[in-house]
Image (cartoon, rainbow, N blue to C red):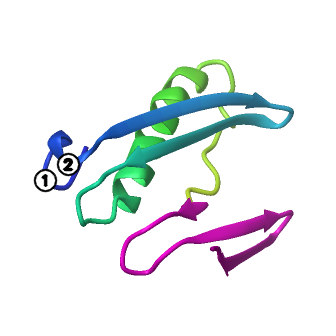
């Protein structure tokens, strides 16, 4: 993981779920330190997606990675927020 090292994180989970149109990779990074971990969460997803892509290209040369985004964030200086994703719309929203 980037940043100052793994000792900054309380927990890191990466999940891969099969969807009708492909695979969905998600990660959850929890840290009690006063630092944002959005880049670490994105890096975890990117690394997992690239590893999967490397394996899939021999079976499907048209395989690709789409939409690497932060969907939700809790805590920190900017507070809580989330991204509503429906079809091609991508909007930020504040959460409580």
Tell me the CA gap for discs 1 and 2.
7 Å
Q: Residue at x 47, y 76 (%)?
A: 79
Relative horizontal placement of residue 95, taking residue 76 as reference (left or right): right
Per the rendering, the mark at residue 15 is none
The location of residue 29, given as percent across then percent down, is 41, 46
The answer to whether residue 92 is above or below residue 16 is below
Q: Secondary structure at mark 1?
A: loop
Q: Secondary structure at mark 2?
A: helix
- Tell me if mark 2 has few (under 14), some (14-19) or many (20+) residues whose alpha carbon lies within 10 angstroms of its own: some
Q: Which residue is mark 1?
A: 4
Q: Nearer the viewer, mark 1 or mark 2?
A: 2
Check residue 83 for magenta coloring: yes
Q: Residue at x 53, y 21 (%)?
A: 55
The location of residue 50, given as percent across then percent down, is 47, 37
Relative horizontal placement of residue 30, taking residue 87 as reference (left or right): left
- Tell me if mark 1 has few (under 14), some (14-19) or many (20+) residues whose alpha carbon lies within 10 angstroms of its own: few
**Which residues, given as a range, are shown in magenta?**
70-96
Q: Nearer the viewer, residue 17 or 68?
A: 17
Quarter of the view holding residue 34:
bottom left
The answer to whether residue 60 is above or below residue 5 is above
Q: Nearer the viewer, residue 88 or 8?
A: 8
The answer to whether residue 34 is above or below residue 43 is below
Q: Are marks 1 and 2 in contact (CB under 8 Å)?
A: yes
Check residue 50 for magenta coloring: no
The location of residue 27, given as percent across then percent down, is 50, 42
In the picture, the quarter occupied by the N terminus is: top left
In the picture, the quarter occupied by the C terminus is: bottom right
Quarter of the view holding residue 47:
top left
Q: Residue at x 64, y 52 (%)?
A: 66
Q: Which residue is mark 2?
A: 8
Q: Residue at x 61, y 60 (%)?
A: 71
């Amino acid at each position: 993981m980037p940043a100052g090292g793994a000792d900054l994180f309380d927990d890191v989970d990466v999940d891969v779920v099969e969807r009708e149109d492909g695979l969905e990779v998600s990660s959850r990074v929890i840290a009690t330190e006063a630092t944002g971990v959005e880049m670490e969460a994105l890096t975890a997803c990117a690394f997992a997606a690239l590893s999967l892509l490397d394996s899939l290209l021999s079976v499907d040369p048209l395989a690709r990675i789409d939409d690497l985004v932060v969907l939700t964030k809790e805590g920190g200086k900017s507070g809580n927020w989330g991204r509503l994703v429906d079809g091609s719309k991508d909007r930020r929203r504040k959460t409580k």
